[in-house]
Image (cartoon, helix red, strand yellow):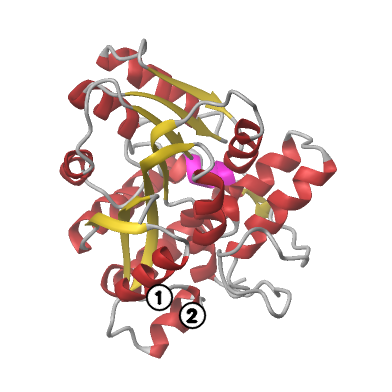
Amino acid sequence: MNGAQLLLIIFGGVAVAALAHRRGVRPGLAAVVLAAAGSFIPGVPRAAGNRLARRPNTLNPWTAHRDTDTVAGMDVLRIHEIAEAGHRILNPFTEDKLMLLGEVCRLRPGQRQLDIASGKGEMLCRWADAFGIEGHGVDISEVFVPAARARAAELGVAGRVTFTLGEGAQVLTEMAVQADHPQYDVVSCIGATWIGGGLAGTVALMRRVVRPGGLLLIGEPYWADDTPDQAYTGLGLPKEDFTTLVGTLDRIEAAGLELVEMVLADPDSWDRYTASQWWTVSDWLRENAASPDAPAMREYLETCRRTHLRYQRRYLGWGVFVCRTER
């Protein structure tokens, strides 16, 4: 695994595998989780014939077994939590873009939202405060879930939004098989389509708990139209791992959805997400120089800076795509 691949692992959230291992998830589920996590790691062998065997798409079909529990001897979820310790929004959106997304979704008081991989809960908490929605968030991080609950209390919306620790795919699957399972007006999975093996598999999970005509919010990367071959190499990802914006539209439509709106990150908002981690990690390294985790964090910091400046902010786009479930 090269340095660029480390950065993409962190961003993609393959920490789910480490968490599943640490918590002793039952073998059947752990295999699914490890397959989904492994699908995100550039360079991991995939079974031939899978539609997006080269990247995080389709529902957990990979059989290749890879140790994704640690990077440079450190739990990857822990790297994620350290690097984003100073963040409220755990993706390349600024506060303005987050609130714009809520506006274009035309949210109304009383609507209910389920947010999978909810991080520190900023989206649900801010939207509950601004638009009067109710919601529930699910995340795998024992650090982020308490932070989300604290944010809800801080904004005075703890009576309308709740957060639980859990794995997104498992929660959606268990919810869907309940005879009286709740149906949500909005179901979101922002930057974590690895929970279903990629966009198509995640959509299949999400649409089971959204009401007819409801909205799915999907956070997904895309390639710039002029991405050169060296960028794919430098980032450690084959070209077909992602697609262009219009290619993303094709994938959304192939999943049976109608794209009705979108909000995209830009180089400046990428900087706020990525560059602000440099300071956080640099401070952590100064304060924890003797930590056994310091080498992994130093590798992350050095890789994060170089790949972001050389390739990521220019060629790797990111956005949230607002989709109707009925076309």
**Taken as a whole, is the magenta stretch helix, strand or loop?**
helix
Residue 129 place in picture, x, y as percent: 22, 21
Q: Decide: few, some or many residues near mark 2? Use Cα within 10 Å; few <14, some 14-19, many ≥20.
A: few
- Residue under circle 2? 240
Image quadrant containing the C terminus: bottom left
Residue 106 place in picture, x, y as percent: 19, 38
- Residue under circle 1? 243
| x 78%, y 63%: residue | 65
Q: Quick check: 66 above or below 128?
A: below
Q: Decide: few, some or many residues near mark 1? Use Cα within 10 Å; few <14, some 14-19, many ≥20.
A: some
Which kind of residue does numbered mark 1 sit on? Thr
**Which image quadrant for residue 72?**
bottom right
Q: Secondary structure at mark 1?
A: loop
Q: Disc 1 and disc 2: Cα gap in Å?
A: 6 Å
Q: Quick check: 80 above or below 253?
A: above
Residue 28 place in picture, x, y as percent: 82, 45
Task: Say whether residue 35 is left or right of residue 270.
Answer: right
| x 26%, y 16%: residue | 155
Q: Does residue 32 appear in the picture of this structure?
A: yes
Which kind of residue does numbered mark 2 sit on? Glu
Would residue 154 be counted in the magenta stretch? no
